[in-house]
Amino acid sequence: MARYDRAITVFSPDGHLFQVEYALEAVRKGNAAVGVRGTDTIVLGVEKKSTAKLQDSRTVRKIVNLDDHIALACAGLKADARVLINKARIECQSHRLTVEDPVTVEYITRYIAGLQQKYTQSGGVRPFGLSTLIVGFDPYTGVPSLYQTDPSGTFSAWKANATGRNSNSMREFLEKNYKETSGQETIKLAVRALLEVVESGGKNIEIAVMTKDKGLRQLEESEIDDIVAEIEAEKAAAEAAKKQPPKESTS
Amino acid sequence: MKLDTSGLESFAPHQGVDAEFKELSLVASFEFPNVTNFDDFQKKAVQMVKPAKGTTTLAFIFKDGVMVAADSRASMGAYISSQSVKKIIEINPYMLGTMAGGAADCQFWHRNLGIKCRLHELANKRRISVTGASKLLANILYSYRGMGLSVGTMIAGWDEAGPGLYYVDSEGGRLKGTRFSVGSGSPYAYGVLDSGYRWDLSIEEAAELARRAIYHATFRDGASGGVASVYYVGRDGWRKLSGDDVGDLHYKYYPVVQEEEMTEAAAA
């Protein structure tokens, strides 16, 4: 099949891989996704575009399990995501079979990034149009990790990161407000970052929390509403405190 | 049967991603001999090339780690080809493998395992577990099942989960355990090992137990002899404790009692 062997991803004269950059554009048009790493909790959040009335929203899961201790959220082409996630899930089990050990977060990230890179250097294929946020706990040391991969196949570890639509504003917010948190505080930080770019309300946000003992847990809409309400209250209180004249008067 | 080239392959496909599936059709094949009963013929062929595992090796876990011991005799039938074979193979500074069966097979596949372990370390920034290493070896041996490899090995090491000991053989079997002995001298070694074993042996006691077990096996089994080597695997890796000629050990355990001078019986 010589006709289909020609590479689609070739270098431009000034050293760019345009297909990869176009793939990154596709990511930028995808829904917002954020990940925050705490000391004992890792939180993934995605923007949920309003579901059609007749659509069964349970079949549109955006945050998925790769194994008991690893989860993934992505931004970009969802069909590409399905293929990548299936391959990653198989690799998680294959690793368990060959070395009798669960994968580490770094290993599976390296595998996914390797796959994404392979598709930028093969004939007849195009790059995957998605960036992923991969979270999990190390099976032996229990250390939490958050990694990000992108269509070019690079990956790195982060304390908190965002991808997809308006990711720059979310990242700016995280850079300003990040601090080591645990438990509920971590969840609130992720929600606050998402609220910067998404209409507020539990209907438009999907949050999943991963802990070492309980694995991945998707939060109910009501829980998210409660957290959003808490955050709004905190914001209002902060605003009020700023506006109030200073109590100590120099009288 | 797909041969194991995983240590050598590159990951860039030449032509699209279907190359992974094309690999299956590239396996080398040969013409089958024209006999009436092929299965029988296959069995006889395997038996013909299968060297008997003339050796004694043993390993056991105790409270301070793993003790590994072996003899050093290589025999070709009734001919002793060498009295100084290294049967304890150093896979890496914290893992040992023992050799029983075909010497070439054991040496090659242990070195290959060492390569795989090192690659795992470099890729994952942490050491491979004894479980993982033994599984890698067992999977390779399984893929060569029926092709005449003769390997009866024990993988001993100390990893994050503590001391580990696995028995792996060329039939593709893999067993986790605390006491193993492999080879033609193993029944004799088991006798001494099992009767003297306690979990809370000290390092010196465990070494002496291992040494005596190898000695007794070399005493009764013609295919075992030479030097009894004893290695200890602890938290910081393995170290060689002793290598005693079994002849010397014999006279140490059973010194010759000087016969009394014959004296005339007192006249009745």
Image (cartoon, grey):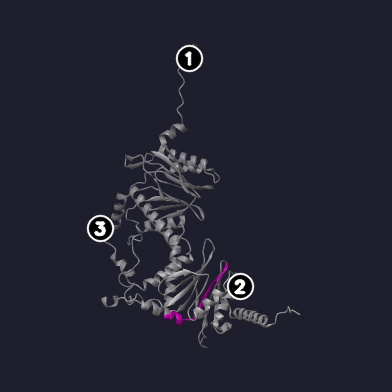
Q: Amino acid under label 1?
A: Ala
Q: At x 31% / y 42%, what residue is drawn?
A: B77
Mark closer to the chain start, 1 or 3: 3
Q: Which residues are magenta?
A: A25-42
- Answer few, some or many: residues within 10 Å of disc 1's Cα (few below 14, many 20 plus, some between 14 and 19): few
Percent x, y for residue A96?
Answer: 46, 63
| A146 to B169, vertically: above or below | below
| B150 to B124, vertically: above or below | above
| A167 to B188, vertically: above or below | below
Asked if the magenta segment contains residue B127, the reply would be no
Look at discs 1 and 3 and give the one toward the viewer. Answer: 1
Q: At x 32% / y 55%, what residue is drawn?
A: B147
Q: Which mark is residue B36?
A: 3
Q: Does residue A246 appear left or right of residue B56 in this picture?
A: right
Pointer 3 indicates a residue of which chain? B
- The residue lying toward the viewer, choosing from A53 and A152, is A152
Q: Which mark is residue B265?
A: 1
Q: CA distance from mark 1 to mark 3?
A: 78 Å
Q: At x 40% / y 56%, what residue is drawn?
A: B137
Q: Which residue is mark 2?
A: A185
Determine which quarter of the picture holds residue B35: bottom left
Q: Does residue A26 appear left or right of residue A194 in this picture?
A: left
- Answer few, some or many: residues within 10 Å of disc 3's Cα (few below 14, many 20 plus, some between 14 and 19): few
Look at discs 3 and 2 and give the one toward the viewer. Answer: 2
Q: CA distance from mark 3 to mark 2?
A: 76 Å
